[in-house]
Amino acid sequence: MKKIKTIGLIITLIMIFISCEQLPDPAGERGVAVVPGISGLNPGVFDINDLENAFVQFTINIPEGASVPAATLIGSFNNNHADVTITELTSFPAVVTITSADAAEKLGIALADIERGDVFDFELLITANGRTTRSTPLVVPAACVYTTSISTGSFHANGGDWGSDGDITLTADPDDPYKIYVVGLEEIEGLVEDLGPLVMYIDPITYAVNVPRKAIASDAWGMHNIAYEGSGTFSTCDGIYTMNLTISVDEGYWPTYSFLFTRN
């Protein structure tokens, strides 16, 4: 049985106000005038395993009633601020498809030189009512495309200092491939997961993992309702989940522990 420590809850609110001089942005003002919306990004990465055919697609919308005579989609690579023109847009909503080959060519990059983890930044320059505004960057990494064949199945869970080590099973929700059910975290410690499964949510763009608090076993060595919550990242290339999880029971909680879920 693991020993639980009683930890008092301390909430500290710190507010820092920093004033700084506003300097003009030569590429245009940010956060004013017409603000476009980007939706339906799919896929969210350039497939590092097939860069010659990889692409991303998304839809650009403008607020109802706004008039935008022209917009320029610009691109940069690894935050080099190249701001090269990728395409010009003249009507909205606009469905935009960008291939990695086209983006690389316009940025002067050889496909063979692109490595896993490199990122492309795409922004819109919009001219309307005599003002040019720059949108929030759309970040597209060079990574492996997400598939449930790599994110689910039989995994080995290692809890590090928490002391658990054994096999777990991950399955995807039939209606949402980014919603992952976890079974076995407490079964490997001899408990009955009568309140499970634990649920993890993978961000389809960043592959960050969010785990809302969920009790998975009502009895934990005489304590009650052992629960997990936390966050982490999922690697679409090798299927590794790198997690930081806080474990608690009704009687109190433990510190945050690092967990690694690797495919069997």
Image: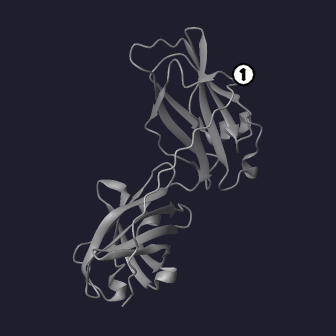
Q: Name the one closer to the observer, 12 or 39.
A: 12
Left/right placement of residue 140 relative to residue 92 reads right
Name which residue lies at 42% across and 70% down: 246
Q: Name the one closer to the observer, 220 or 77.
A: 220
Image coords of residue 244 (percent x, y): 48, 68
The answer to whether residue 45 is seen in the rendering is: yes
Q: Quadrant of residue 212?
A: bottom left
Image coords of residue 94 (percent x, y): 48, 24
Q: How many marks?
A: 1
Left/right placement of residue 211 relative to residue 205 reads left
Image coords of residue 260 (percent x, y): 51, 74
- Furthest-top residue in this view: 130
Name which residue lies at 23% across and 73% down: 195
Protein image colouring: one colour
- Element type where label 1 sits in the image: loop
Name which residue lies at 53% across and 60% down: 236
Q: Is residue 165 above or below residue 142?
A: below
The amino acid type found where label 1 is placed reads Pro
The answer to whether residue 197 is seen in the rendering is: no
Mark 1 residue crowding within 10 angstroms, few (<14) / some (14–19) / many (20+): few
Left/right placement of residue 85 relative to residue 165 reads right
Image coords of residue 58 (percent x, y): 48, 35
Q: Which residue is mark 1?
A: 26
Q: Is residue 59 above or below residue 13?
A: above
Q: Name the one closer to the observer, 91 or 230.
A: 230
**Quadrant location of the N terminus?**
bottom left
